Image: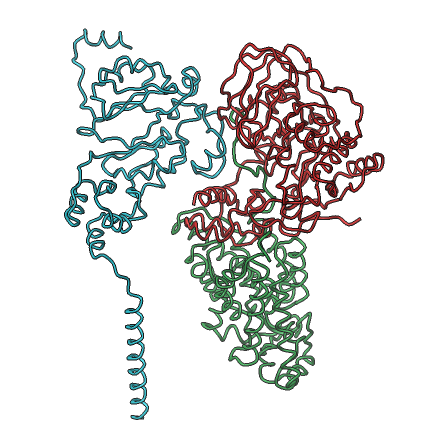
Amino acid sequence: MDKFLVSPPPHAHSPRTTASLMRDVIIALLPATIVAVVFYGWSLVLVLAVSVASCVLLEWAICKWLMKRPFECPEAAVVTGLLLALSLPYTTPWWVVLIGAAFAIGVVKMTFGGLGQNVFNPASAARVFLLVSFPSYLTHWEMPQRLFGADAVTGPTVLSLANEGGTQALANLSQMGWHPLFAYVGGSAGEISVLALLVGFAYLLLRRVVKIWIPLSIFVTVAAVSAVFHAIDPVTYTGPIFNLLSGGLVLGACFMATDYVTSPMTSKGGVIFGFGIGLLVMMIRYFGAYPEGVSFAILLMNMAVPLIDRWCHQPKFGREE
Amino acid sequence: MTETILWTVAILAGLGLLLSVVLFLIAKKFRVEEDPRIDKVEAVMPGANCGGCGYAGCRAFAASAVAAPNLDNHFCPVGGNAVMKQVADILGYEVQEKAPMVAIVRCNGSCANRPKTSEYDGVKSCIAKASLYAGDTGCSFGCLGCGDCVAACQFGAIAMDPETGLPVVDEEKCTACGACAKACPKQIIELRKKGPRGMRVYVSCVNKDKGAVARKACAAACIGCGKCVKVCASDAITLENNLSYIDFAKCRLCKKCVAECPTGAIIAVNFPVIKPKPTPVEVKKEEEYA
Amino acid sequence: MRKLTFPIGGVHPEDMKYSRGHAIEVLPLPPVVYVSVAQHLGAPAVPCVAVGDKVKTGQVVAEPGGFISAYVHSPVSGTVKTIGPRADIAGRPVTHIEIVVEGDEWMEGIDLSEDLVTEIPTDREAVLEKIKACGVVGLGGATFPTHVKLNPPKDAKAECLIVDGAECEPYLTSDHRIMVEKPDQIVVGAAIMQMVLGGCRVVIAVEENKPDAIAALDAAIGRLGYKNIEVATLKMKYPQGSEKQLINAVLGRQVKSGALPISVGAVVQNTGTVLAVYDAVQKNRPLITNVLTVTGDCISGDRMHNYLFRIGMPLSYIADYAGGVPADAAKIVSGGTMMGKPIANLDAAAIKGTPAILYLSEEVTRRKPEGSCIRCGRCSDACPMGLEPFLLNRLYKADDLAALKENAVQDCIECGCCLYSCPSFIPLLDNIRMAKAKVKKL
């Protein structure tokens, strides 16, 4: 080397890069993905493939031809694709998935400026978009074929049953084989196993990719709110355990609400953010028209993030009284 | 039904009336009295808000000019004499004409003239680079080439020449606001008189090292040999700290120093090109000079 | 035993201290030395010798140029050849005194023996005068004149002297080696400072990755029997050697923004400085030597060294003696990877505070292209001052100086944790440095 480099310190960098962080998120989503594929079979593989491929290709195309800048982090697009696929029922037609992916990347992410600039979580926004655009495909799930033999049984989701009447529905569900940690009934692909999602999330925590505050705050709020309502009227309102483990709550809390870009920067802000999501989820579940409210709650709180960031700052060294 | 509509209209109209009264009172109470001439002066200003006059913007300049007893300390470099004449008319002051100025880059350390000795790997900013070290060449005085001056120019009058790695001023666009000169951490850019038909002679170097050191670092450095000082008939050139400087107030543009300078550090611009006469005698003479 | 650390931020870079097992070697004298007059924080010293003068080792060659300034001594005996500008490691011209080495004849009155002098003098003013006369400056990085730092204002009371043996920078092992090899001298030096500060508590703070140093210091304290001196074990965390973070770790107190450590009753001195104070007060030896580490990621362990160098030795001389610059070194740094100064000019002379010659390979050190901020918050998590680097970066780009000031940009200690941890390689610290300079001008 004839000419030495000169740069301001620091002269070395942590091995963590945006790409490696996103790879960790992909790894963390693998257990849930594998369990879902085992249960739902090839039709889910198609949903996954369409979702991931269209997210990546679309972002690449927009970067290349519209924004004319390098495609910075394909891993982030993969995460969006995976999350979107896992939040849809495995029966979703491929063209609906394609529209969802196009909305997630083309509208929610890239129109705001691409990586790091979006206000809303692309996967949640796309799921909500599909939910209001194609409700028939997204709210009427078929039972997993593996469990009920050759004939597919169409049935409502756990939550849409529960929306009609608390304890009784739960009892019906238990008879149908519903188990909190391993749901054998229809729903979004990623909801099939809460356990697998939690294992993935534990990996993220262990690798210090995300902090626990946002999901913890969501879970505590959901548990507290539902405990209060359940105590008041156990017939109308479902209880904490059911609410924690059903619907997309775990998937949303652990993987969508913790999205770096659309969540507050500080831990304190994260707690407020999580509290808001938890409260909104329960309000939508108890009083709303939709049986499921996690995606809506996340989007609503995404909007509040700039405000939360304005308000919440870290304690500064030597400036706290 | 009719009643509902009537009530709605009445309430909204009442609310509108009430709020307009509130707005009127607030506007009355917090009204700021201002000299109307400030608005007039601001209207004739270029509106670039560049700060070249030394004030925060055109309005600040206008407010200060209105309050001042005369216009001696106020000059808008962007608008020049024409704008100042209008300002003087509004305020009823006298204003002296000033010669038009232009920014010049006093460094000729192009990639060819000044070899690199290290590779800068930090953020692309001259201030950051200058605070870190002397620069990526042997010359610790010259242009750092990160383009802070380009970023500072609001008029798009400076651009980096990718070939030389040096900034180039577009004389047509330059308003001599001085933002680039302020932005340059090495104080290379100077505001100079534009000169008759743009003709100028200046030393394009700020290196204060001893001749041998400067020469080693850059082929186009002023080595402080003093030949230009001796040859100058109008006493316009001074030599200080191994560096020549041409006083543009005294320079008569004879270009003798340009011919004399052994490193080509003295530059003459915008002179009409004199075609060398195609006689063999002349060519021979030129060879002798070389 | 409870291990201490500071509560806010910090990062855990790999410590890379492969040269920790290498005993300190003494470098032979070069043919010529170049003694800089700017080896300390504050006004440069003023040369007090003339060209042609014969000087002895330890003779004053430059006198303080102001209140915050220091004496500079000749590191060799020989003849002054030139006095004039010479490029320092940043390539900037600084006045250097060039001395042609003719031997190593020390001034009279300097005790060159290795005998340990354990008796602590009691005349505070005389001790401070001696420290000043010997040109002792802080060797932890800032090179602040020690006699000024040891003389806090009359109304302030020092409660605790913290001797900084954290050496939290990756690669560096010079402090580690002197703690292992000269623990007695360090403890005596600390006891001298304790006397100067009016008999306060002394804590020698060492990070847990140096168990041999902790054991050596503990044994020395037991042997020498001074009162109120102890060793504290710190957890490994960067930037623990920073004054404010170290005080917070050891005493649990936070120095208020803009205040000096003495405002919470603390004085921090680096181990190297403590050793220099011992040499100055007990041995009358001026500060003309220090220990530096030659290390890096692109040289093998057997080519790493801890050298006792004399000030004024050209760094290229030291590098050559250590086997030359490795072929795959892309950057040479004077110091560690986190805060070391880049060496633009290897011909520059070593100064009192030169901590290391660190060779880094292109792979480790070249900056990656800047990506987009993904708002991960790792920079805020890493900032030991509790600042929000991503916000400061944004405000700097918007040129919002008032908001920068409000968000405490001037509190930044430039430790580099934010840039180190940013997964998108955004030059946060570079921009914050410029923002600080702009806010300072306000």
**Can you say whether A248 is above or below C210 in the image?**
below
Q: Nearer the viewer, residue B54 or C407?
A: B54
The chain letter corresponding to green is: A
Quarter-of-image position of residue C71: top right
Q: Identify the residue at horizontal 43%, vertical 49% (top origin).
A: C401
Q: Residue furthest right?
A: C223
Q: Nearer the viewer, residue C368 or B214?
A: B214
Q: Horizontal and vertical percent for residue A319?
A: 57, 54
Q: Nearer the viewer, residue C309 or C330?
A: C309
Q: Horizontal and vertical percent for residue C34?
A: 57, 18
Side of C75 where B123 appears, left or right: left
Quadrant occupied by the N terminus of chain A? top right
Q: Horizontal and vertical percent for residue A296?
A: 51, 71
**Can you say whether A261 is above or below C4 in the image?**
below
**Can you say whether C395 is above or below C227 in the image?**
below
Q: Identify the residue at horizontal 64%, vertical 19% (top origin).
A: C75
Q: Colour of chain C?
A: red
Side of A298 where A40 appears, left or right: right
Q: Colour of chain B?
A: cyan
Side of A174 where C344 appears, left or right: left
Q: Horizontal and vertical percent for residue B98?
A: 20, 35
